[in-house]
Image: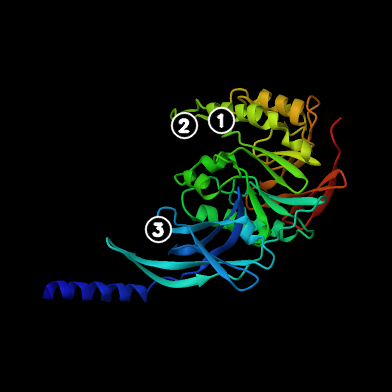
Amino acid sequence: MRMLLISLLLAGYCSAQTATNLPPFELTSQPILVENKACYRIIWSTTQFGSAKVVVTQKDGSKKAFSDAIDGVGDFQTRLHHVDVPKALLETEGASYCVSSRRTIDTSRYGYQMGEEIVSAPHTVKAERPDDNIAFVVISDVQGGAKLASQALARIDEPYNFVLLLGDYSNDYNSADDYIEPLLSLAYQASKGTIPCLYVSGNHEIKGTWSRLTNQLFPTPSPDNQRYFTYSFGPLFITALFFGDDHSDDMPRYSGLSEFDAYKDREYDWLMNDVLPKQEWKKFRYNMVACHIPLIRADNDLTVTHFCKECNKSHGYKLPEFAQALNETIKPQLMVSAHTHQAQVVRDPSLSFPNLQTGGHLGRTKFYHTSLVRFVNGTISYTVYDSTGKKTTYPIVPSK
């Protein structure tokens, strides 16, 4: 009994000593709101492992707390935190929210020892969805160029309604840091935690030992958590698509594990048998497609080709069918994509919609540009902001 008492005292002493010599516990990224069906997923990060909680304060001062517990206990062994909160609650007039995390000091067989708590400043959700004049900013293809991307975002000097996260923030995902600076911090800079972010996967989100976490951390409005979905914001209807990686399934690097062709078959069935029969897009003034890998591309000499024609042995499987289905049925006014790291409009004479490729890094540490897209008075335009301070606005003339 005496030895047991001494052991417990020593354990407590050691824990106390450890707790006083811990590294700083701070927020490394402020909260962002990601569209997640009837909820917003609120995501933030910390320097060390900790717990996750969101407190919503109503106009009358009443409070309601939410955690990430889904099976009776939350995740306190992570630096990447997320909590789902109903949109209706966050969008109530006068409501605000704060995120908080408590440091994880020690986990044992019978319990947990938690340390100090850090709390964010309050944030208020901007819930306006106007009938016209809708704009969004695109962030994509960062991949080592986070500082330049931040400079480009800092140049934006006009209002917008949401942030379109269009993929490829790291070359591969092998730690929490691969999400924090190139994605979470940039998304907060653009959204300030007050307007929503819409997440559309890129081909690099499947690379790295942590890649599976991407789909778990970043939801979509899909009812069955797919990477393809439809979404609306005010007068804008979006069909979001995901075409997998930019190599064929039989590439040796995949060791026979890649099944993107089968995934695109299921996605195409969803488009033909779920989206098209409902014709939801007809209820909206504006109609666009969002995808990381575009259906149209321009070579260096601006010769326009389908990706599917040029890369038939690569990632072009099923893309001709997608292009034809979109062209003949939904007839989007615009396709917004990334992947090429160019900011330009590309057209294919056989398709009724132009393809805006929205930017990204050029040389990683040399240059970054991004686009703000605006729908207003029946017209579409895009403004390119770059890391050198240049700003240029272009009209997007509908295809004939």
Q: Of helix, strand and loop, which one carries label 2?
A: helix
Kindly identify the amino acid type of the residue bearing the numbered disc 2.
Answer: Tyr
- Sequence order check, earlier mark of 3 and 2: 3
- Which label sits in the foreground, 3 or 2? 3
How far from the left and from the top, in percent, is residue 314?
59, 27
**Relative to 354, does residue 16 appear above or below in the rendering?**
below
Mark 3–mark 2 CB contact (< 8 Å): no
**Relative to 186, does residue 337 appear above or below in the rendering?**
above
Q: Is residue 384 visible?
A: no
Mark 2–mark 1 CB contact (< 8 Å): yes
Q: Which residue is mark 2?
A: 254
Say which quarter of the image contains residue 126: bottom right
How far from the left and from the top, in percent, is residue 158?
79, 59
Q: Which residue is mark 3?
A: 73
**Relative to 220, does residue 258 appear above or below in the rendering?**
above
- Sequence order check, earlier mark of 2 and 1: 1
Q: Residues within 10 Å of mark 2 (few under 14, many from 20)?
A: few
Q: Which residue is mark 1?
A: 247
